[in-house]
Amino acid sequence: MKVLIDRETVERRIGELAVEIAADYLEAPLFVGILTGAAQFMMALIDRLPEEMLAKLDYDFVDVSSYQGTENTGQVVLVKDLTIAVEGRDVLVIDGIVDTGRSLDFVLDMICTRRPHSLKTCALLDKSARRALQVPVDYCGFEIEDAFVVGYGMDYDQRYRALHHIAIIE
């Protein structure tokens, strides 16, 4: 395993993203994390938001899957739906990594049918070289190369997810 982005750099960039997001929203948006990869990133992002935004912030998770072990099947399925209504709300979808774009596209389409006021996206990692579907990444932590990465929520067969840095599996 080779460290791609160290802990200090990851945490600094998450702080910068929190500042950008807070500046763009007059009212706190509904944060929707895509499980399981986005959970650690989303909670770190929330932790760095200004106090006045936290008082009004709602968050929820959706779980979709296109992987079996380490293999991407290409078929996205809904595992867990949202429990909070999105109609008329500003929604920010949080993902750990945007790879092919299929999972994010699936979630965006699902949320769009529920008529949010606005819909934006945030990803810790963007691997645009593997993009199969063009999806927006409104707030991006890092553009990365086409490599299999783990850490900060990303896993290899359910391992390495809790690392505080991003690493490449060699």
Image (tube, rainbow, N blue to C red):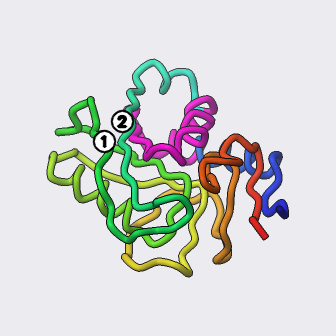
Identify the residue at image location x=38%, y=76%.
Answer: 134
Three-letter residue code for mark 2: Leu
Looking at this view, name the residue that lies furthest to the front: 69
Identify the residue at image location x=38%, y=61%.
Answer: 103
From what the image shows, is residue 67 above or below residue 93?
A: below
Q: Is residue 35 magenta?
A: yes
- On screen, residue 82 versus residue 24, left or right, reads left
Q: Nearest the camera: 95 or 72?
A: 72
Q: Earlier in the sequence, mark 1 or mark 2?
A: 2
Q: Are marks 1 and 2 in contact (CB under 8 Å)?
A: yes
Assign a secondary structure to mark 1.
Answer: strand
Quick one: label 2, few (<14), some, or many (20+) residues within 10 Å? many
- Estimate the x, y position of residue 75 in percent, counting from the top left: 32, 67
- On screen, residue 96 versus residue 27, left or right, reads right
Range of residues picked out in magenta = 19-48
Q: Nearest the camera: 145 or 24?
A: 145
Assign a secondary structure to mark 2.
Answer: strand
How far is mark 1 from mark 2, CA to CA?
A: 6 Å
Looking at this view, name the residue that lies furthest to the top: 55
Identify the residue at image location x=83%, y=60%.
Answer: 3
- On screen, residue 13 versus residue 91, left or right, reads right
- Estimate the x, y position of residue 71 in percent, counting from the top left: 51, 67
- Estimate the x, y position of residue 26 in percent, counting from the top left: 39, 36
Q: Which residue is mark 2?
A: 30
- Estimate the x, y position of residue 12 in percent, counting from the top left: 75, 46
> Which of pointers 1 and 2 indicates the residue nearer the eye?
2
Residue 84 image-quadrant placement: top left
From what the image shows, is residue 76 above or below residue 83?
A: below
Q: Which residue is mark 1?
A: 90
Three-letter residue code for mark 1: Asp
Quadrant where the image shows the C terminus: bottom right
From what the image shows, is residue 25 above or below residue 64?
A: above
